[in-house]
Image (cartoon, coloured by chain):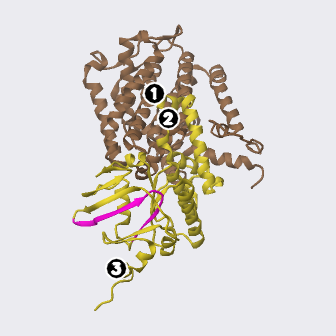
Chain colours: A yellow, B brown
């Protein structure tokens, strides 16, 4: 992919360090994400990629460093505050609400857009009804976008794996995020499902202009999709740059293939 | 064939989101409402209304409340008896202090008081889950009953420690006290239950219901998409306690007439209501009614069959009843964890195709 041009920085992480006890999970990580780009975070297992996402959306609080999102610098933030600022995510192990239907899962993704109080909700009249219908329309647009009309009333716990991943993407999109964090969206998929998911990611980026930060192990997918890639290994930042730069970086090759013994 | 949706097209989302989108369901509900308010009070005698239907309706209300908390929000509570006592003592104090507000207002007020108490005892749920939370709510059960036994202010310092509901009227008709007719009590309780069943259904299908279920199914993911656990859990505790408080108020003021906390609201009540929602169906409004109906009717039915039919000793019959309830709970947990409401749903699925196999 030829390098696309991007303007403002939407997210900047500065010297982030995170440790659990003596385990140093992230060590002095700094990178930025520009508005509208697809940014990948890669690295071998245990490199701290998921921890990095957890730091960004406020689930882990780093001991050192700052995060600047949309010009606002902060150290730690509760997850629901991150959500209300426009950061949404999906999970490595699907974290859908299994007892609820596809539609309800996506509607729950819009809960921050809904404001009517419990009394109107109890009556399901007036503003509550209007709000419910407006959000239903928005949810239906996402259902159409992801082509999951047929399963909208099905409980998600019974859906096949690939569809569950898609519903989870839908739930994240429902919040109309500015920054979408995808934690291994293609884990455990066959090549056809991977192609579908890649297409959805590109479309989301294209049509909604959503900035995407992506963790993925499939290097083919990463190199094709990403505008820029940051590489972590054992909590340390190995490289940061365009896919072709990263691919040629000796440190990255060593981390993935191992260094030969002397 | 009977339960067929063919030809029922929905042209807009409003129709699709209706309370009962399928026409047959609507007819059933109309039939049930008609039966409740027109047929039942005509054909059933005083004994039936008083011994079976009233407790069934009041327990349904309590089960609805617990279902909001345990079925929808996934927070186990063993404090139902204690919260019913809060409702009962609230309405007692209110009936004595401000009877001029009217009985319905007082019922709702005692629900609101219980909601506040419930939200307070729900605070531990922000830190602890599952069994540990169950134990914490168990503590609230014992604490509340102890409080109502110990502090004279709650029962107006009378010698027995009992509370007795003074006579009150709605539109000039007596609904509490020994003079009130069973029919009047029935209409009052049935109306309150019908209205608040609708409210529960509305809450369950709206934002609050979805947030509760999100917390139940995957609390971390819920938090990361913006559901605040504090608000979701405490609102579930408050709404649940509101229902249970109203049920407690009706249980004492309308049905029992007088009550003593240790006897009327002990831990067995908590278990009974919990069993109702397990057998009826967790996370289902219909299930709350089915479970309450089952556990209120079954003992009476068993007793009638055993004592009158087979001439069994009534003490033995009581033991058989306890064993049957225990066995049924185990069977339901293993075979159909979603309870009677799920069986009903399966039956509906079958009825859609009947008489064809597929």
Q: Which mark is residue B167?
A: none
Q: Is mark 2 on a helix, strand or loop?
A: helix
Q: What element carries label 3?
A: helix
Q: Which residue position holds label 2? A: B64
The one of A245 and A85 positioned closer to us in this rendering: A245
Residue B341 place in picture, x, y as percent: 58, 43
Residue B78 place in picture, x, y as percent: 38, 40
Q: Quarter of the image holding residue B253?
A: top left
Q: Residue furthest top?
A: B172
In the image, are marks 1 and 2 on the same chain? Answer: yes
Question: Could you tell me which residue is drawn at 46 percent across and 34 percent down?
Answer: B65
Q: Badge 2: few (under 14), some or many (20 or more) residues near its Cα, within 10 Å?
A: many
Chain of the residue displaying label 2: B
Q: Which residue position holds label 3? A: A251
Residue B84 place in picture, x, y as percent: 40, 29
Q: Quadrant of the C terminus of chain A?
A: bottom left
Residue A30 is a magenta residue: yes
Chain of the residue displaying label 3: A
Position of B308 compared to B12: left or right?
A: left
The residues tagged by marks 1 and 2 sit, at their Cα atoms, a distance apart of: 10 Å
Question: Can the viewer see residue B338?
Answer: no
Q: Give the range drawn in magenta.
A: A22-42
């Amino acid at each position: 992919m030829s390098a696309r041009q991007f303007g403002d920085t939407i997210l900047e992480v500065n010297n982030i360090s995170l440790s659990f006890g003596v385990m140093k999970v992230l060590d002095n990580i700094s990178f930025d994400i520009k508005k509208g780009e697809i940014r990948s975070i890669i690295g071998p297992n245990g490199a701290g990629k998921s921890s990095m996402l957890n730091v960004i959306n406020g689930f882990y609080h780093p001991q050192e460093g700052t995060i600047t999102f949309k010009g606002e610098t902060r150290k730690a933030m509760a997850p629901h505050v991150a959500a209300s600022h426009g950061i949404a995510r999906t999970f490595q192990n699907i974290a859908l609400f299994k007892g609820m239907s596809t539609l309800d899962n996506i509607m729950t993704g819009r809960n921050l857009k809904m404001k009517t109080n419990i009394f109107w909700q109890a009556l399901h009249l007036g503003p509550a009804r209007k709000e419910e219908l407006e959000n239903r329309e928005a949810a239906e647009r996402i259902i159409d976008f992801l082509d999951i009309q047929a399963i909208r009333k099905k409980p998600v716990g019974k859906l096949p794996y690939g569809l569950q991943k898609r519903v989870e993407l839908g739930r994240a999109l429902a919040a109309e995020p500015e920054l979408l964090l995808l934690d291994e969206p293609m884990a455990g998929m066959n090549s056809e499902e991977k192609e579908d998911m890649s297409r959805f990611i590109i479309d989301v980026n294209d049509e909604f202009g959503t900035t995407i930060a992506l963790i993925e192990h499939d290097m083919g997918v990463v190199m094709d999709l990403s505008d820029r890639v940051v590489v972590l290994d054992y909590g340390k930042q190995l490289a940061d740059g365009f896919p072709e730069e990263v691919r040629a970086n000796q440190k990255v090759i060593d981390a993935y293939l191992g260094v030969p013994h002397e | 064939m009977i339960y067929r949706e063919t030809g029922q097209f929905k042209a807009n989302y409003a129709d699709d989101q209706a309370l009962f989108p399928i026409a047959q369901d609507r007819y059933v509900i109309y039939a049930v409402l008609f039966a409740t308010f027109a047929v039942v009070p005509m054909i059933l005698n005083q004994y039936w209304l008083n011994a079976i239907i009233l407790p069934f309706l009041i327990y349904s209300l309590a089960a609805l409340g617990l279902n909001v908390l345990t079925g929808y929000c996934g927070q186990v509570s063993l404090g139902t008896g204690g919260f019913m006592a809060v409702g009962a003592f609230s309405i007692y104090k209110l009936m004595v202090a401000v009877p001029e507000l009217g009985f319905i207002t007082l019922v709702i007020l005692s629900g609101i008081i219980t909601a506040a108490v419930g939200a307070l005892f729900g605070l531990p749920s922000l830190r602890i889950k599952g069994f540990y939370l169950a134990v914490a709510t168990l503590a609230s059960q014992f604490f509340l009953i102890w409080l109502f036994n110990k502090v004279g202010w709650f029962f107006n310092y009378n010698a027995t420690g009992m509370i007795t509901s003074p006579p009150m009227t709605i539109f000039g008709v007596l609904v509490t006290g020994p003079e009130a007719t069973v029919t009047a009590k029935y209409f009052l309780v049935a109306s309150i239950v019908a209205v608040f069943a609708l409210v529960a259904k509305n809450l369950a299908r709206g934002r609050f219901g979805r947030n509760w279920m999100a917390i139940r199914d995957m609390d971390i993911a819920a938090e990361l998409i913006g559901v605040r656990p504090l608000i979701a859990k405490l609102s579930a505790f408050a709404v649940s306690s509101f229902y249970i408080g109203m049920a407690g108020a009706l249980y004492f003021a309308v049905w029992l007439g007088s009550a003593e906390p240790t006897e009327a609201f002990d831990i067995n009540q908590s278990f009974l209501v919990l069993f109702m929602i397990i057998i009826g169906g967790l996370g289902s409004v219909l299930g709350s009614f089915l479970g309450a109906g089952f556990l209120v009717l079954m003992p009476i039915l068993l007793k009638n069959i055993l004592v009158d039919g087979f001439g069994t000793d009534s003490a033995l019959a009581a033991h058989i009843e306890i064993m049957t309830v225990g066995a049924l709970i185990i069977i339901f947990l293993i075979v159909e964890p979603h309870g009677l409401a799920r069986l009903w749903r399966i039956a509906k699925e079958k009825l859609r195709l009947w008489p064809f196999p597929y």
